[in-house]
Amino acid sequence: MKLPFVESHKIKMVESIKQSSPEERKQWIKKANYNLFNLHSDQVFIDLLTDSGTGAMSDKQWAAMMLGDESYAGASSYFKMKEAIKNILGFDFFLPTHQGRAAENVLFSAMIKDGDLVPGNTHFDTTKGHIEFRKATAVDCTIDEAFDTASENPFKGNIDLNKLEEVLSKNPTEKIPLIIVSVTCNSSGGQPVSMHNLKAISSMAKHYHIPVFFDSARFAENAFFIKTRESGYENKTIKEIVKEMYTYADGMTMSSKKDAIVNMGGFIAFNDEELFKKASVYNIMFEGFLTYGGMSGRDMNALAQGLDEGSEFDYLQTRIGQVAYLGNKLKDMGIPVLLPFGGHAIFVDAKKFLPHLPKEEFIAQTLAVEIYLEGGVRAVEIGTIMADRDPLTRKNRYPDLELIRMAIPRRVYTNSHMDYIATCIFNVFERRDQIIKGYKIISEAPILRHFTVTLAKV
Ligand code: F0G
């Protein structure tokens, strides 16, 4: 008999989690103003809010932390991180930052100005927030199939080259400071971008003399999909694929809380020394001196180790295999899930789950609340609330997709937790006809409102 697939790690330390009663959850979510970000973590049984900073570090990462060098300038930990970035990603210059959005803040301060256009595949909300904060516009050039949850296109993170060419050819070059490609594309469901597409974007950008940056939070998961889905790459190692991916980029922003498997950290990496120098000024102002930029030495050590582990095939097979395990369970139960499964999360199509709810009542948010009430599982809305208002008209933006995202933390939960989650969602699906009312907004922030919005039942 063929031996079955198993996890590529064993467990050395455990943390208890506690179940709650439906009555307790009803009170807690009401007190949280129906915003799942307001729940205390001990009110959550299985936390799928994010895979960001929630992973379990390895024994080697914890060991590396003990060797952290906390010198203000020139710490050995900085050089370890520099070496890992050069070896794995290929960049000569880098700036450490405290997380991904800090990297965006520093880089965009050096590159983006009022009135600019920043094309890319669906920009993540902090990326878009930092672009719009500078009165520039994020232009979504993702392929149309990305918005069809039933399409099984293997690279739904791809940029539509015609849409990109349209933006590049119809606008003055000085108005387009950079192109941002998210690998994988979180906002369209953790969907990968093919090597073929990365190469084509790079050559088009070169033609127009516009730099390309990869938003790289889940670069290794992207490489795993290239290896397993794109012909010509099946025999290459993840590290070889990663190296090739970055030959098509002029730089990257990184939220290390994802594929570098640390709880906090980020960086910007570049080829261009001049741009590095320009961004350095902002790094010192916003983040810290160039050799730590918002990170402690021990965290830089863990990050260097995590970049290496996170780009190993066995680890990625376990990680992406677990996400697919949950996805397949839900699919078999008839739950409308986004296909193909993303690398870091399973997305449920809330419009198909609750087709009778009007979009004005925040369909995906309603579903996320119901799943919490059912079993203490915390997912996150990727829908109208997260889409914010249009900066000019201040009207709600209704995205094509109303999703809930169940992001799976790295190396944290077992497959029996996945079974529990699937049953929880199935139970909500069974009683979906009784969910007839959604929510209305009571208060909201002008930008990135989903973190702090307060809601009431309609
Ligand atoms: N880019 C992408 C693609 C992301 O997914 C995130 C964060 C960021 C940038 C910002 O990085 O959080 O370190 O400041 N995504 C998290 C998530 C928050 O839950 O998907 P950060």
Image (cartoon, rainbow, N blue to C red):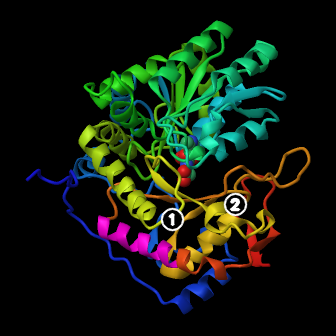
Q: Say if disc 1 is inside 8 Å of ligand 1.
A: no
Q: Residue tagged by mark 1? A: 335
Q: Position of residue 34 (x, y in %)?
A: 67, 75
Q: Is-magenta flag for residue 332?
A: no
Determine whether the residue tagged by mark 2 lies in a helix, strand or loop: helix
Q: Are marks 2 and 1 in contact (CB under 8 Å)?
A: no
- Name the kind of residue labelled 1 in the image: Ile
First in residue order: circle 2 vs circle 1: 1
Is residue 36 or residue 301 the one in the foreground? 36
Is residue 89 or residue 408 the one in the foreground? 408
Q: Is residue 410 above or below residue 101?
A: below
Q: Residue tagged by mark 2? A: 450
Where does the magenta region start and end?
415-427
Residue 285 in sight:
no
The residue positioned farthest toward the bottom in the image shown? 23
Determine whether the residue tagged by mark 1 lies in a helix, strand or loop: loop
Q: Position of residue 413 (x, y in %)?
A: 34, 64
In percent of the image, x 59 and y 44: which residue is there?
Answer: 188
Q: Within 10 angstroms of label 2, few (less than 14), some, or many (20 or more) residues?
A: many
The residue positioned farthest toward the right in the image shown? 393
Residue 201 in sight:
yes
Q: Position of residue 337 (x, y in %)?
A: 52, 57
